[in-house]
Amino acid sequence: MLNWRRDPGYEQRMNNNRIAIERSKERTKQIEKEIEQLRQENARLKALNASVRQLCFPPESSSIPQTSTAPDCKPS
């Protein structure tokens, strides 16, 4: 028969490792949730940016200022 003795700190290290694994899993879930929220926010911001570009810089606009056809308007 072998004279085998269990490592006295083995159980504590295994428990600590299990706890660390569970914390890591929880943190991973939290990060995945945050990533999903950031993707949604990014999509909203892209849509908002596209709307701003469309409203502020319509396709027909150019670098040459448009002249007004109204008789009471004076160029500035």
Image (cartoon, rainbow, N blue to C red):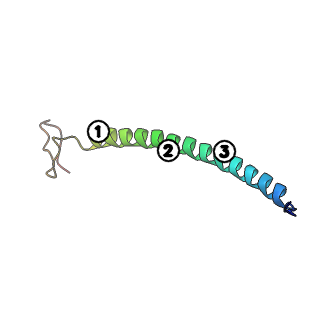
The answer to whether 72 appears left or right of 20 in the picture is left
Which numbered marker is on residue 38? 2
Q: Amino acid at mark 2?
A: Leu
Q: Position of residue 55 (x, y in %)?
A: 29, 38
From the viewer's side, name the closer residue of 40 and 68: 40
Q: Secondary structure at mark 2?
A: helix
Q: Residues within 10 Å of mark 3 (few under 14, many from 20)?
A: few
Q: Secondary structure at mark 1?
A: helix
The span from disc 2 to disc 3 (Cα, nearest Å) is 18 Å
Q: Nearer the viewer, residue 28 or 21?
A: 21
Which numbered disc covers residue 26?
3
- Disc 3, disc 1: CB below 8 Å? no
Q: Residue at x 46, y 42 (%)?
A: 39
Point out the tag, 1 or 2, that comes first from the N-terminus: 2
Mark 2 or mark 3, which has the lower sequence index? 3
Instruction: Name the amino acid, label 3.
Output: Glu
